[in-house]
Image (cartoon, grey):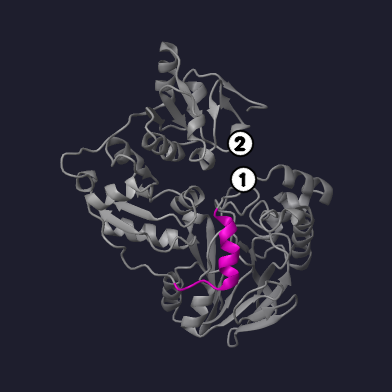
Amino acid sequence: MFFVDTIEVAGLGNRSYLAGGGLTAVAVDPPRDIDQVIAAAARRGVRISHVVETHLHNDYVTGGLELARVTGAAYLVPAGARVAFERVPVDDGDRTEIDADGGLVLHAVATPGHTPHHISYVLEEHGTAVAVFTGGSLLIGTVGRPDLVEPRLTERLARAQHASAHRLAAELPDETPVLPTHGFGSFCSSAQAEGGVTTIGKEKASNEALTRDADTFVADLLAGLDDIPAYYVHMGPANAAGPAPVDLTPPAPADADEIAARLAAGEWVVDLRNRVAFAEGHVAGSVNFEAEGQLATYLAWLIPWGKPLTLLAESAEQLLAAQRELARVGIDRPAAAATGDPSDWVRAGETPVSFPRATFADLADRRRDGHVVVLDVRRQSERAGGFVDGAVHIPLHTLHQRLGEVPDGQVWVHCAGGMRAAIAASLLHAFGRDVVAVDDAFDAAEKAGLTVRSGPCR
């Protein structure tokens, strides 16, 4: 009897898998922090005999090379991926025995599109397909985006995605579970779909790659592509070179004087506490990226690559979780860290600073009293669905480079739900601006009496 265990990497919107039988198993697209994969194998009482990659990932640093080294497993990587380390190259049609007693075999199927070399793996039990690991190819309701490799290849890869989806649909039974790596909030997905479970049959009925002709699908896919996180440019090369083992030992401790010195030197000091606590009191000049939010995605997107980073956390546990999350995207070693609360992080004679939070109803009341700057930090694709009339639009991932473009006056900053508004408010506050963070769902804006427009916007 086979098993498939899912390893959630929620902060990045990804999944890894451990699949096998009674004795041995294969790890598919493992995250960099491999201890959780090893723990999953230990719970099953199996040996990891194989580690496989569906492609060279563009959104995270893989743990595949290190997992294979630690466990002695064979490391299978698509033959077309140019890498600088020893691996077992995988070609279309290759079959790999995973568990002899269980009759488990992994069948490689070339599915280019997300990358030119992409491989999906069909898990077969005694010759019958029981699951397909689709990586960044066929996702739930969509496909992996085709624009992360090279702009000149984007349209060609989009057409390849359509063909690859149709190949999987034609070759696999409708009841075959589809187990993608991306698509649960990852920016590697070309769109975000609801649900966490699907099959080939369900995708045939609902996935536009399978319900539309190639020309229509490609045109719509290319038109709908969203912004690419800036740090993605570093992930592919890191994975091709062979990532170093992850180091999650505690960073050097920072006292109040060192925190102040690092801020004075222009370094980034990041407060990991929730946005409510941060707004109520924080170190002047620090910025807020909630540990419980999409920490790795947004911090790695905004911080200049290689910039020294100091983390402020309310506990050692929160700090370690943040280190783990950041290591997954190649931010390996914080320069320093401190735990506690703002009273511990400011020098003698200094006090924490704060800024107010509000709702869209508060914003509507404030607008009736007079002029106020409204800053929308959502992405363009979100804003196209509706925006507050008169709001200035600067997407969060560009704000740190465009702070001088925000008009004078008190700035009421909003996003879709509050998390990104808190990040933006902290950046503006550190820049010396008078800010109010709108911590509210955008759906509440029109209900509060604000004029919400749709259609073309600037």
- Relative to 326, say whether 70 is above or below: below
- Percent x, y of residue 197: 58, 57
Question: Quick check: 449 left or right of 286?
Answer: right
Q: Which residue is mark 2?
A: 380
Residue 227, disc: 1
Q: Secondary structure at mark 2?
A: helix
Where is residue 132, by image quadrant? bottom right
- For badge 1, the amino acid type reads Asp
For label 1, the SS is loop
| Extreme residue in the left direction | 348
Q: Is residue 74 above or below residue 258?
A: below
- Residue 18 screen position, x and y as percent: 52, 72
Residue drawn 58% across and 56% down? 232
Can residue 47 be seen? no
Question: How much space separates mark 1 and mark 2, taking CA atoms?
Answer: 9 Å
Residue 317 location (% of width, % of height): 30, 59
Which range of residues does the magenta coloring cover?
A: 231-245
Magenta stretch: helix, strand or loop mostly: helix
Name the side, left or right, on which 434 lies relative to 136.
left
Residue drawn 68% across the image and 54% down it:
143
Instruction: Name, please, the residue furthest toward the top.
Output: 369
Q: What type is the residue that disc 2 sits on?
A: Gln
Question: What x and y, as percent, mark residue 287?
Answer: 37, 43
Eyeballing the image, is 63 above or below 255?
below
- Residue closest to the eye, 128 or 265: 265
- Of residues 106 and 458, the one nearer the viewer is 458
Give whichever of discs 1 and 2 has the lower sequence position: 1
Outermost residue to the front: 265
